[in-house]
Amino acid sequence: MSDLAWLSRSALLVGNEGIALLQQKHVLVIGLGGVGSFAAEFICRSGIGEMTIVDGDVVDPSNRNRQLPALATNHGVSKAQIMKERLLAINPELKLHVVEDFLTPQKCREILAEKFDYVMDCIDSITPKVTLLSTALQFNLPIVSSMGAGGKVDPTKLRVTYLPDTYQCVFAQYVRKRLKKLGNASTIKAVFSIEEVMKESLIMTDGSNFKRSAYGTISYLPAAFGGVCASVVIRDLLGYKVDIEKRPERIGKKSIAKSKKATQKKS
């Protein structure tokens, strides 16, 4: 019989029934960088019974400022393998599947053909992200997707909404544009920040792994994104309420002009 004493503090919060429910669930985490590595660990520590983690990348020195697997001693080592060892050290009874691969359309279909109770999209490149989200929608899977964590420093500005209602996030804008023809894109829960991006932190890259540019990052901000993503998954699986940010009403230039004319006529 499983020893669940390590989850006793969680049981005080969600009850033994909640723990039992989470033990029956299978969560997919794709992308084990600054957001996904922390999200995966939080999901594991919640008592989820089964996980699949996906990442084809290895640790780079530039990862050490924000990514859980990255240490000075493991440059060049697979992030997926490092996270495998870490997650199983947290919960040896976790049923864990590891995919060391980058996300091609074919690989995406292969992975999502399995049954998942929730998909966590922690990819930070537009093309593979859109591939994952569009494929997951075809399989009618519940999804939470992390938007842009780069170029920002304030974790109190993080919000949760449905993808079409994201705002003040250029990364989310690109994703919305690519998925706008899919009618069910409105079912994707998105974690985003309403903080203005620090444009001066932008650098151009060599274009590898579908990334032509990148914003500067700070240690805690991607982890905060990972925490919010994990919380959405756990709360949804337990049937707890997730507050959804409402997109603020915006008055277009034409509406402003009409309002001014109406005011002038009244006066």
Image: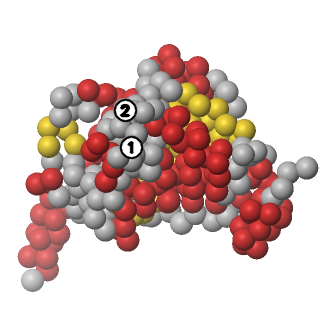
State left or right for residue 176 relative to residue 200.
Answer: right
**Disc 1 marks which residue?**
73
Name the kind of residue labelled 2 in the image: Gly
Q: Residue at x 57, y 56 (%)?
A: 42
State left or right for residue 204 relative to residue 157.
Answer: left
Q: Residue at x 29, y 59 (%)?
A: 218
Q: Classify mark 1: helix, strand or loop.
A: loop
Above or below 158: residue 107 = above
Give yes or no for contact between labels 1 and 2 (Cβ–Cβ under 8 Å).
no
The image quadrant that residue 50 belongs to is: top right
Above or below 72: residue 115 = above
Can residue 248 be seen here? no
The image quadrant that residue 102 belongs to is: top left
Closer to us: 171 or 101: 101
Say which mark, if any, is on residue 186: none
**Disc 2 marks which residue?**
76
State left or right for residue 66 relative to residue 17.
Answer: left
Q: Classify mark 2: helix, strand or loop.
A: loop
Closer to us: 34 or 3: 3
